[in-house]
Image: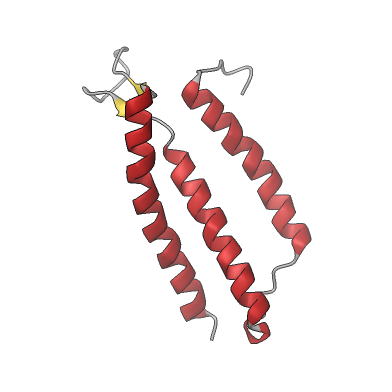
Amino acid sequence: MLTPFFLGIFAASLLLCFILTKYVRDIANRRGWVAAPEASRHLHSTPLPRLGGVSIYFSFLLTLGIALLWAGHYPALNLGLTLKPLITILVPGTLIFLLGVYDDISPVGPYFK
């Protein structure tokens, strides 16, 4: 019963991530937030835009919010999601996301991470 619902949420998240990635890539290129191939360990020959995690994070949050709203309107879905496990996952995940964004914009050392 719930399998089509979860597959739909996954498909929506994947589609939204593809769409947001284009916009995030364009913004990163315009602002100069790119990883230039400056060291011999870099395998790419052209600058690569950073901030790819932004599109992943926001597509996850948006589709999670939509799933929770939808489940609230249709109690028969009963996703089994409660607030405590969601907060347990989202708070540390958000902190890691923010550190990653900060590192992409202004690189920090490994000890800070």
Toward the left, the furthest residue is 45
Percent of width and height locating residue 104? 47, 26
Q: Quadrant of residue 38?
A: top left
Q: Quadrant of residue 74?
A: bottom right
Can the viewer see residue 10 in this picture? yes
Percent of width and height locating residue 46? 22, 23
| Residue at figure coordinates x 27%, y 23% from the top left | 47
The total number of labels drawn is 0
Percent of width and height locating residue 45? 21, 22
Can the viewer see residue 49 in this picture? no
Decide: is 41 above or below 16: above
Toward the right, the furthest residue is 84
In this picture, residue 72 sits left or right of residue 40 = right
> Which quadrant holds the C terminus?
top right
Percent of width and height locating residue 67? 58, 69
| Residue at figure coordinates x 63%, y 42% from the top left | 94
